[in-house]
Image: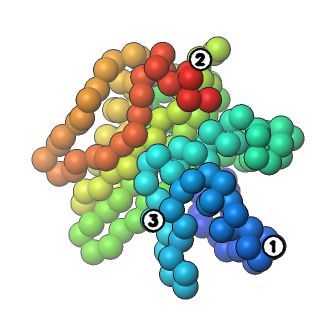
Amino acid sequence: MISNSDNDAVSLLKRKCQPGYLPQLVAHLQIDAPSPGSAEYFINPMSMSKFFRVLYNGVYLGPKMSELGLDMLNALRFQNGIVAGLDSGLVVAHKFGERMMGNSAQLHEFAIVYDGGNPYLLGIMSSGTNLNELSEILKHISGLIYRGAEIMLLQVDFVIPHFAMMRPACFRNFF
């Protein structure tokens, strides 16, 4: 499930978790709670980054379970987007989500890039009309960040990506 980045894992967790666990988790992480009864959960970049920080630091689940979670995210089969903008061989724990609704496409991806002794978190949320084009934009942004370029905002006629990112040198304190 996780290696395909599908949301079946969420359904499984909802069935297996103790009642009240999800509200406790969102309160602890200080993120917006899902709407009761809603089949969808929309998350913003800062909230998503908190999940990755918790896994990276191993403070919520403990070191062994956090490592297991990161290993599962390292095995993700999606090799476009952020991963495609990096040198091959880098370890990347990442999660992506894509959605098509009529002519509207969304592609979001968050990743911890283990760049030697300088791991960093990169999150990109994008929308447009074509998933392949969005994937190329994620790849381009990832490559620029990896190579140390500074970006404030990238605007392209068919998409305006919304992303939460920092250069690797600035992001070390986040973890």
Q: In which quarter of the image is residue 175?
A: top right
Q: Which residue lies furthest to the bottom in this view?
A: 37
Bin the neighbour count of mark 2 within 10 Å (Cα to Cα): few under 14, some 14-19, many 20 and up. Answer: few
Amino acid type assigned to the residue bearing label 2 in the image: Asn
Q: Looking at the image, which residue is at 61% across and 43% down?
A: 52
Please name which of the two marks, 1 or 2, marks the residue nearer to the observer. Answer: 1
Position of 154 relative to 3 (above/below): above
Count of all numbered marks drawn on residues in the image: 3
Quadrant of the image occupied by residue 106 = bottom left
Q: What element carries label 2?
A: loop
Q: Mark 3 points at which residue?
A: 42
Mark 3 and mark 2: Cα distance apart in space = 30 Å
Q: Which of marks 2 and 3 precedes in the sequence?
A: 3
- The reply, left or right, for residue 57 in relation to residue 44 is right
As drawn, 23 above or below 83: below
Element class at badge 3: loop
The residue where tag 2 is placed is 118
Instruction: State the image coordinates of residue 62 (x, y, percent, origin top left).
Output: 83, 43
Q: How far apart are marks 1 and 2 (CA)?
A: 37 Å
Q: Name the residue under label 1.
A: 18
Q: What residue type is labelled 3?
A: Phe
Q: Decide which of tag 3 and tag 1 comes sooner along the chain.
A: 1
Q: Which residue is drawn at 80% across and 48% down?
A: 61
* Inter-mark Cα distance, 3 to 1: 22 Å
Secondary structure under tag 1 reads loop
